[in-house]
Image (tube, grey):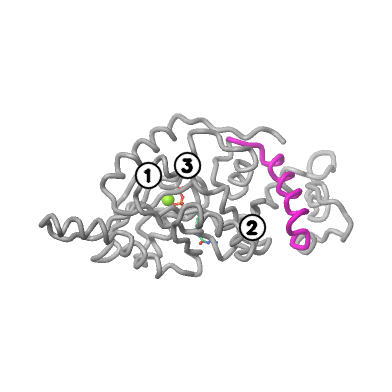
Amino acid sequence: MKFIHWYPGHIAKAERKLKEQLNLVDVVVEVADARIPLSSMYPDLKDLIGEKPRLILMNKADNADIDRAKIYTDIIKTKTDCDILYTSAKDSRDINKIINKIADLSKPAITKLIQKGLLPRPARAMVIGMPNVGKSSIINKLIKKTKAKTGAKAGVTRQQQWVRINPRVDLLDTPGIIPVKQVEQSKALRLAFVDSIGENAYELESIAEEFLKIMFRLYPENIILKYGFEENEEFSLIGIAQKRNLIGQKSSPDTLRAASMLMNDFRDGKLGRLMLDE
Ligand SMILES: Nc1nc2c(ncn2[C@@H]2O[C@H](COP(=O)(O)OP(=O)(O)OP(=O)(O)O)[C@@H](O)[C@H]2O)c(=O)[nH]1
Ligand SMILES: [Mg+2]
């Protein structure tokens, strides 16, 4: 596989900015992708946020194989001692539980204010996570309006933005950040699958080949059904190109278009409910 790498310059700045805002909030809401729960959680987040109460949202649950995801999220839950919700900004799953959780987690901070003789204020939570996991979409779902810009690419949210959800809760939308420190290639690969890292960081055909290998191990039926492979046939981009009649120069199978079709089908949820961490 070709190496996946990214440049940390602007990421370091985003991380710094996030740290600056941390003093203003009572709670951190971390959004990850339920299809790759381990790979999409920010590594060593505790170093960044310290003892702030944290709520974890495994989003895009509508496209995730939740039974398999739970194998990992149970471990995460034990390790972090944080509540985990499986949310979907598409079908609204568990969205209405978020506000109560934030209100609960912020109680100690608000109580402290009152004890100091200050007026109570709405709970403040900061929504953070890797790019494209659905942070802004969740916020829009909560306010039932399109206030935060969203899009199917990494880096849609450019600036932090406060949004009042209701009289009790204010949320800070933040730009997605990928870790300054390179993560393991197996994680980087999965982040590329879900479009969390920009397409300049990898070669599409290379990650699509890896995607097929993982699908062969975990969900062969989904690929067989979608593209019409035979039971014992090896999965390949050439195979997809042939079956879909994607012909390039000199009448050879167009593997780049096959890669693009495959990854788009996955990203659009057309390959079924999956969980790709191993
Ligand atoms: N199927 C599905 N798609 C979702 C869900 N949440 C968000 N999306 C889609 O995922 C893409 C990214 O959503 P955003 O809300 O822009 O993600 P973000 O985390 O704010 O991204 P950045 O601002 O780039 O960090 C959009 O195309 C959304 O429509 C979900 O729960 N299920
Ligand atoms: Mg956003």
Specify the quadrant that holds the N terminus: top right
Please report the residue visible at 55 percent of the width from the left and 63 percent of the height from the top.
Answer: 61
Please report the residue visible at 49 percent of the width from the left and 40 percent of the height from the top.
Answer: 178
210 falls in the magenta region: yes
Place residue 230 in its image quadrant: bottom right
Q: CA distance from mark 1 to mark 3?
A: 9 Å
Read off the magenta span.
201-223
Please report the residue visible at 61 percent of the width from the left and 38 percent of the height from the top.
Answer: 184
Locate residue 252 relative to residue 207 in the image: left or right: right
* Residue 161 image offset from top left, x and y in percent: 31, 50
* Residue 263 image offset from top left, x and y in percent: 66, 51
Please report the residue visible at 39 percent of the width from the left and 41 percent of the height from the top.
Answer: 48
Place residue 171 in its image quadrant: bottom left
Q: Which residue is mark 2?
A: 275
Locate residue 205 relative to residue 82 in the image: left or right: right
In this view, the residue in front, 49 or 262, is: 49
Disc 2 marks which amino acid?
A: Met
Q: Earlier in the sequence, mark 2 or mark 1?
A: 1
Q: CA distance from mark 2 to mark 1?
A: 27 Å
Disc 2 to disc 1: CB gap under 8 Å? no
The dot on residue 44 is: 3
Q: Residue furthest right?
A: 232
The dot on residue 49 is: 1
Mark 2 residue crowding within 10 angstroms, few (<14) / some (14–19) / many (20+): many
Q: Earlier in the sequence, mark 1 or mark 3?
A: 3
In this view, the residue in front, 256 or 118, is: 118
Mark 3 residue crowding within 10 angstroms, few (<14) / some (14–19) / many (20+): few
236 falls in the magenta region: no
Disc 1 marks which amino acid?
A: Ile
Q: CA distance from mark 2 to mark 3?
A: 22 Å
Mark 1 residue crowding within 10 angstroms, few (<14) / some (14–19) / many (20+): some
Q: Principal SS element in the magenta part?
A: helix
